[in-house]
Amino acid sequence: MRPVTIIMVFALAAFCAISSAPSMVYAAKVQSAKDQPSEIKATELHTSETQPPETNERCLSCHAEETDDFPHVDAKEFGASIHGKNLCISCHTDAKEIPHKDKLAPVSCGTCHRIESRIYMESDHGRALSKGIGEAATCTSCHGKTHSLLSSRNPASPVNHQNIPKTCGNCHADAEKMSKFRLTEKEPLDSYMQSVHGRAQQNGATGAAVCSDCHGTHDLHSAANPLSKVYRVNVPKTCGRCHENVREVFERSIHGKAMQSGIKESPVCTDCHGEHTILSTKDPGSTVSIGGIAKTCSSCHESEKLTKKFGLPVDRLKTYEESFHGLAAKGGDLRVANCSSCHGWHDILPSYDAHSSINPKNMRFTCGKCHPGAETRQISGAVHGTTGTAVSKSHYVTEWVKIIYYILIPIVIGSMFLYTLFDYIRKTLSHRKPWKDDPDDHLKTGPAFKYDSNAAFTSLHHEHEDDEEAENILRFTVNERWQHALLILTFVVLAYTGFALVYHGSWWAQPFDFPGGEAIRRQIHRWTALVLVLLGFYHLIYMFGTARGKELIRTRFLPAKRDLTDPINHTLYNLGFTKKKPTHVYPSFIEKIEYVSLIWGSIVMATTGLILFFSDYSLQFFPLWVADAATLVHFYEAILACLAVGIWHMYWSIFDPDVYPMNYAWLTGKLRPKNKHEEALKQD
């Protein structure tokens, strides 16, 4: 070894020994101080010569002790912290000389974390702090105690991903503390915990979104700030950090393109899914669930302001609810198509776009998802537009159906109402005597029949002048009374269960307003309809296959000339234009109108009901407008039938002064002589 090298080695060793001497002396002094009372330690250290603390042990010799004389630092916690390898003086820069001042300057995290500090000071929290708002969150508010700070990867850290909701909730869950700041979310932690993200996070899903994923960390800003991650234009990008594929699809949709072009009213993720209230699509309470999507879409598409500004079709929700799908969905049937079933979710495109699910060329596949075999020609037509808007006009057949019923219902029901009203007023004000004492107040009748056990019919051609003999006049046989009773039952049940679907949510429809109630309503309606159809076939066989039925058709229900003149003559009499009361022949036009209306209405309701029930087959063989027209006819015919029964039949059976309080023939089968309409028999 060369002499020069040997000299250099010895010189280096001597330098190290000299440099370590002060530390060794100080260590010995510290060890000696530890064996003495705290008063002596404090005095010795503070009166010793001024030296820089080159290791943390010198600081911890005092601050590791739990005493009121010095701020306490747990040496073990500090050593395990993320700053455990840093020197104390790297933060407490004014403690480089020992002894140091009794009160040190506040520590600035920005000394090391300059970028984070600058970003924080520009955030809502930083600006609030600079304005002197003491409640504003600082570094330690989120990261924890200064001497026990842990890495965000440490599960025990307050800023660990799984602990973020609790950490933010330390302030934001305090309603009283937050009330002075008028935040938009009153209970942000509770609402988040009930969301799909919050539930997943509570179940241990490490990838579930927490506060910082959406709002940011040091760069928190109000939603009104364009720099905020939750500013509406930035929302798709924020959500896209986790839902990247969805973001890409959304940006190609009509909503995404509108948003990118600067149309602020265009919906973004939170407009449909919510903010802290985001729920799974399978959750019935979700705004994008099968049962809630129509209401969510209508919040924009039913807005008068938006439809006018952008020229959108109006009454989208109304026209949907009037459709076959809408009526079923309104009643709670979750199997039927809703907005997203046809238009899509994140990939909504206008109908003129070749990639749109509602483009005419794609309708076959769109409708085919629910209606296999549906052809393009047969499903073509306007799903919306039953109001006849310029943008989407419904088929002319459905328009004519509405026009016909808009005219037919007022004319028919209005005529019935006025006729019965004039009849009631005339009879009430006339104060007539019983018919047998008034030669002008009598009724004619056609042949009446008495039913015997041999099914023979006896025509009663002689006059009945006493009540006992008149009570033997048979109006209904037992068989006919059972048919009538079953007809009453099925009619009432069908009317109630049918209108409960159309007017779902009304107080009288509440018996079906529970989970599964729509399925029960639907089954009751359909099975009752089947009973009515079977009753119709039975009545057809009864009328054409039995002696009594054939005789009833021949003698009672065939049209007669006086069926046209009687309504006019009685109207003139009731209005006072003639003094002599015209005679009725039973069955008069009153009973014939009821009977013909019953047959016609039953056929119409059964036919349209079958078209709606077998919708898949209907779409395979008929155009879409057939189902739409069937829906309208089924609804309007039900209204017509109920009003006709309520006004026409109820008046002549109950409220007619000549039969009040009731015509009991439907119960006893026999006529009453005081029922002048049909039971006061006087033959020509």
Image (cartoon, helix red, strand yellow):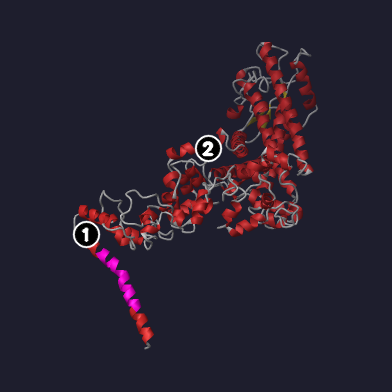
Q: Residue at x 57, y 54 (%)?
A: 239
Secondary structure mostly seen in magenta is helix
Taking the image as shown, residue 476 lies to the left or right of residue 207, namely right
Name the residue carrying label 2. Answer: 511
* Residue 588 shows up from this direction: no
Residue 359 circle label = none
Helix, strand or loop at label 1? It is helix
Question: Measured from the top left, where is residue 611 in percent x and y?
Answer: 69, 47
Question: Measured from the top left, where is residue 405 in percent x and y?
Answer: 74, 35
In the image, residue 25 lies in the stretch drawn in magenta? yes
Report the quarter where the N terminus lies: bottom left
665 relative to 126, above or below:
above
Picture quadrant where residue 427 is located:
top right
Observer-nearest of 436 and 313:
313
Picture quadrant where residue 466 is located:
top right
Taking the image as shown, residue 34 lies to the left or right of residue 211, namely left
Observer-nearest of 226 and 318:
226
Question: Measured from the top left, where is residue 367 in percent x and y?
Answer: 68, 54
The magenta segment is 11-27
Tag 1: residue type? Answer: Lys
Q: Nearer the viewer, mark 2 or mark 1?
A: 1
Observer-nearest of 241 and 484:
241
Tag 2: residue type? Answer: Pro
Name the residue carrying label 1. Answer: 34
488 relative to 120, above or below:
above
* Residue 340 shows up from this direction: yes
Question: Measured from the top left, where is residue 590 in percent x and y?
Answer: 71, 26
How crowded pointer 2 is (Cα within 10 Å; few <14, some 14-19, many 20+) is rated as few
In the image, residue 272 lies in the stretch drawn in magenta? no
